[in-house]
Image (spheres, rainbow, N blue to C red):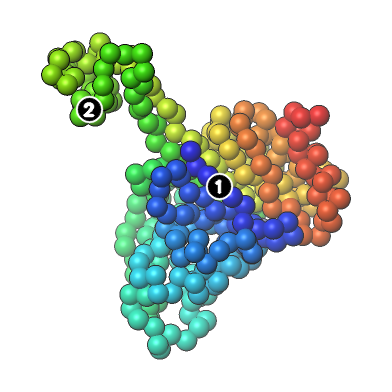
Amino acid sequence: MIHATIKSKIGEDISILFRPDNHPWHYLCECGMASDLTVKEIQNLNAIFISHLHIDHFINFDNILRLQLGIGRKVVVCGPKGIASQIQSKIKAYTWNLIESNSVTYEIREIISEKEVHIFDLFPPNWDLIPRGIQNASSLFSNEAFEVQYTLLDHGTPSIAYLFKEFDKVNIDLSGSPFEGGKWVRNLKSAFEDKANIPIDVNGEVHPSIKLFHLLKTIKGFRMGVIMDHATSLENHAKISTLFQNADQVFIESYYKNSDAEFAKLNHHSYAQKSGEIMAKLNVKQAIPVHFSRRYETTEITQLLNEFNKALGFR
Ligand SMILES: [Zn+2]
Ligand SMILES: [Zn+2]
């Protein structure tokens, strides 16, 4: 399970924090203003994922940088083409004569296309961008708990939608069986993953692995998506459909209410009905509309949420 929390209040820009079960680090999507984000959470970030660099998605990076000074380790930042020099420009706006070189390091993973990611290191006191090579999309980010896939949507500028995919797990259920647990469980699990029929020593009694496979159950990894600013074009919806079909949870921008669809078109944004419809079509288990125009008052946001839910199928 991945636990995600919206850290921006209504009326603020967008920022979503998440953490997988039994995992030491936090992760952040978007750096909009987020007054619910704590110092401890910011200092515990292992990676930050940014869709695009409009001010409402990037302004809080300065605050995050301020609070990460002194953590003494690397933080990964993934984002669109240009993000490396844009982060560097933000940092270079300050004076750094008193900083230690191991205070904090950023590894920027700049998403150039659906296939290509450019890597840069950035560290004090000079904050020069050091190119570290080119990677495939498939290795954008992964660790022992999850991996990340992405697609580039059009928002007048590329806007990256991210899918965070926990790995599937194999669990054993010994209730109702004559066996007790032990080291053999691990051997059985690896035989299961390799689809291998090998002898398994179950606490002194040998059984062929295929006779024990019925004790195992594959638990599908949780799939959580973040789809930020995007036009409601057929091309964008086709890309969203490819990546987020049957996802467990998706946060999707619904910047405008239906009556402002003209503004949505003008500003390459989505609106309540279109965001709700695409989530319904993809059979997303929990679709959460986020990132509403700041000019809306509470009643208008309620109206927007009703429009989203109606399109989702709740009437
Ligand atoms: Zn935007
Ligand atoms: Zn935005």
Q: Is residue 73 above or below residue 298?
A: below
The residue at which mark 1 appears reads as 4
Q: Position of residue 266 (x, y in %)?
A: 76, 53
Q: Is residue 17 left or right of residue 298?
A: left
Q: Pick the residue in front: 194 or 117.
A: 194
Q: Pick the residue in front: 13 or 84.
A: 13
Hey, what amino acid is under mark 2?
Gly
Q: How many numbered callouts?
A: 2
Mark 1 vs mark 2, foreground winner is: 2
Q: Position of residue 36 (x, y in %)?
A: 62, 61
The residue at which mark 2 appears reads as 182
Residue 70: which disc?
none
| Residue 86 in sight | no
Mark 1 residue element? strand
- Gap in Å between the C-alphas at discs 1 and 2? 34 Å
Crowding around mark 1 (Cα neighbors within 10 Å: few <14, some 14 to 19, many 20+) is some
What residue do we see at 45% from left, 70% from top? 68
Q: Image quadrant for the C terminus?
A: top right
Q: Position of residue 260 (x, y in %)?
A: 83, 49
What residue do we see at 55% from left, 33% from top? 247
Hey, what amino acid is under mark 1?
Ala
Q: Is residue 56 above or below residue 251?
A: below
Q: Position of residue 261 (x, y in %)?
A: 80, 46
What residue do we see at 49% from left, 64% from top? 40
Mark 2 residue element? loop
Q: Is residue 296 left or right of residue 292?
A: right
- Earlier residue among tags 1 and 2: 1
Q: Is residue 241 above or below residue 114?
A: above
Residue reaching furthest to the bottom: 97
